[in-house]
Amino acid sequence: MRKTLLLLAACGTMISTASAQLMKKKNDFTRADTLRGMLTPLRTCYDINYYHLDVKFNIDQKFISGSNLFKFTATVDFTKLQFDLYDNLKVEKVTYKGKEVPFAREFNAVYVTFPKAIKKGNKDEFTVYYSGNPTIAKNAPWDGGVVFTADSLGKPWVATACQGAGASIWWPNKDHQADEVDSMLISISVPKGLKDVSNGRLRKVTQLKDGYTRFDWAVKNPINNYDVAANIGDYANWTDSYAGEKGKLDLSFWVLSYNLAKAKVHFAEDVKPMLKAFEHWFGPYPFYEDSYKLVETPHLGMEHQSAVAYGNKYKKGYLGGDMSGTGYGTKWDYIIVHESGHEWFGNNITSKDIADMWIHESFTTYSEGIYTESRWGKQAGQEYIHGQRTGISNDGPIVGPYDVNKEGSGDMYPKGANVLNMIRTIINDDEKWRGILRGLGKTFYHKTVTYDEVTKYISEQAGIDLSTVFEQYLKHGNLPMLELVDVRGKIYARWIAETPRFAMPVRIRVKGGEYKMVNVNKRLSPLTLDGATKDNVEVDTFNYYIGVLQE
């Protein structure tokens, strides 16, 4: 048993170290982090109903100017609220009922004071006018801001990408994922000869007197702030349609004019097969009213709702590579599949706090395996997910700290996908699993959600208490260890894990036999598997992402 004792001691050390590191990280957060990440009374006092964002891009000066109309419903009586805008951008004025009202700034938070109380239940509005040189993204989409560049013919090419950094890096809004605006109008003015492509459907194009052209895009569905996008360039467009579960889904593709021919061929290979697979497993595409668009961008890609950003240079895989190492990842375009998968997980279902970004990324990474399965069979899909384990570091919790706009470990991508495949294995009923995935999209349709809501729903629909499974894999960095001990020829089993009362059924077999689902918890108990010995017992570590310790 010496190995076990050493392992337990090591686990205790790791837990203590992780706790110390977490305490240190918590102490490192600032007032600015809290203002950005917390739902304070100055934010919860109003519910956003509608935005009209109207912005002019002076590309030569890398300068933007414009306004945003906030229409809202008061949730309580109040005289003061908070909206957000990065402090390198100037708030020119805030108007309410035709008059300017006072405002104050603290870091990237802006506080507006109204002349008299706005009563609970009342619908009201105000407008923010602003201008400045927005943050330039140095390596979009991983760092937020605006990309100012040129295409290969030297024509301007501009795009926004702001997940994590927040939409307030380029436009004023209530910058918190918990409150999605119900609908909005996006008006982007660009130098004549260029086009803007934003979310939703193009409502109107207006030639302005100052040599600019304004493009008005109407979004009918709720949308999270970081998805709102401007894409400016010398674009060519073609359209198509897909016969989906809710009828005709309009497809629209916007690419640089000189890429039109190859884009038509390349996009045709994955877009409709992807939509077919995802509608089958996840339910109808969530934004039929706003269409599905794919837009070529100077950055790699982003899940901009109904205007998916594409920058994979018309290559299969992830910039030509395969993160699974199986070969399946080079059979399809990663950006088309992954970023479109976010239409279901991230855009339809959005986490209230960025700490739960795993809800976006774990399910969407899992969707890559689903797409692979839809094309090459279940085994191929599972091999693809399993192959992604090489990218897992187990460096910390996948769930981040709440209220400070901080994500958890990047393991939310490959580890999260492996956890979902493992849960599918535990449920052992693919139709039930498919029903759970579709049920998530239906139950939380166009909603913002929490960790508890998602994990409880899966447990309830599975009929299995998976709460400790989610807790161990999402809130701790270490893997659970399945300990198998030979006591006078009889095999005993237990889990070693940080989560109290951790329990998870696991597939075990005698070599050459069929796998059997065996219930195991943290108490060392006889293994209920006839004929098992220390020499012939096998654990399904292909579908289970666990450690195994045999004594």
Image: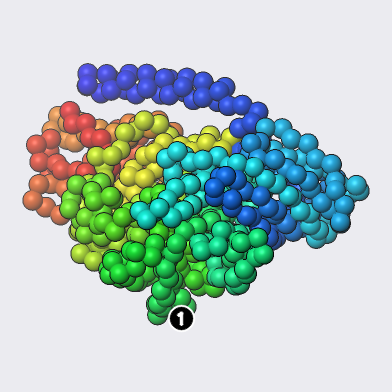
> Residue 394 placed where, x, y %?
34, 33
Point 64% across, 36% down: residue: 88
Can you give x and y, in whole percent of width and height, for residue 452 in the image?
Answer: 53, 47
Q: Split into 4 quadrants, where in the image is the N terminus?
A: top left
Q: Nearer the viewer, residue 228 or 463?
A: 228
Q: Of 109 and 526, which appears nearest the observer?
A: 109
> Residue at 51% of width from left, 20% of height from top?
24
Q: Residue furthest right?
A: 116
Residue type (three-letter) at the residue carrying disc 1: Gly
Query: In the image, 207: left or right of 457?
Result: right
Q: Is residue 109 above or below residue 211?
A: above
Q: Secondary structure at mark 1?
A: strand
- The correct choice, above or below, for 220 with respect to 69 in the image is below
Q: Nearer the viewer, residue 165 or 22?
A: 165
Q: Is residue 381 visible?
A: no
Q: Look at the picture and state if 41 lies above or below 488.
A: below
The C terminus, quarter of image: top left
Whether residue 205 is visible here, answered yes or no, is yes
Q: Report the label total.
A: 1
The residue lying at 60 percent from left, 45 percent from top is 63
The location of residue 411, given as percent across then percent down, is: 36, 39
In this figure, which colouring scheme has been used for the structure? rainbow
- State the image coordinates of residue 315 (x, y, percent, origin top left): 26, 56
The residue at which mark 1 appears reads as 247
Q: Specify few, some or many for label 1: CA neighbours under 10 Å numbering under 14, 14-19, or 20 or more.
A: few
Q: Residue at x 59, y 70 (%)?
A: 205
Q: Is residue 339 found left or right of 120 in the rendered image?
A: left
Decide which of 424, 116 is in the foreground and name it: 116
Quarter of the image for residue 483 reads top left
User: Based on the displayed image, in which of its 4 quarters is residue 200 positioned?
Assistant: bottom right
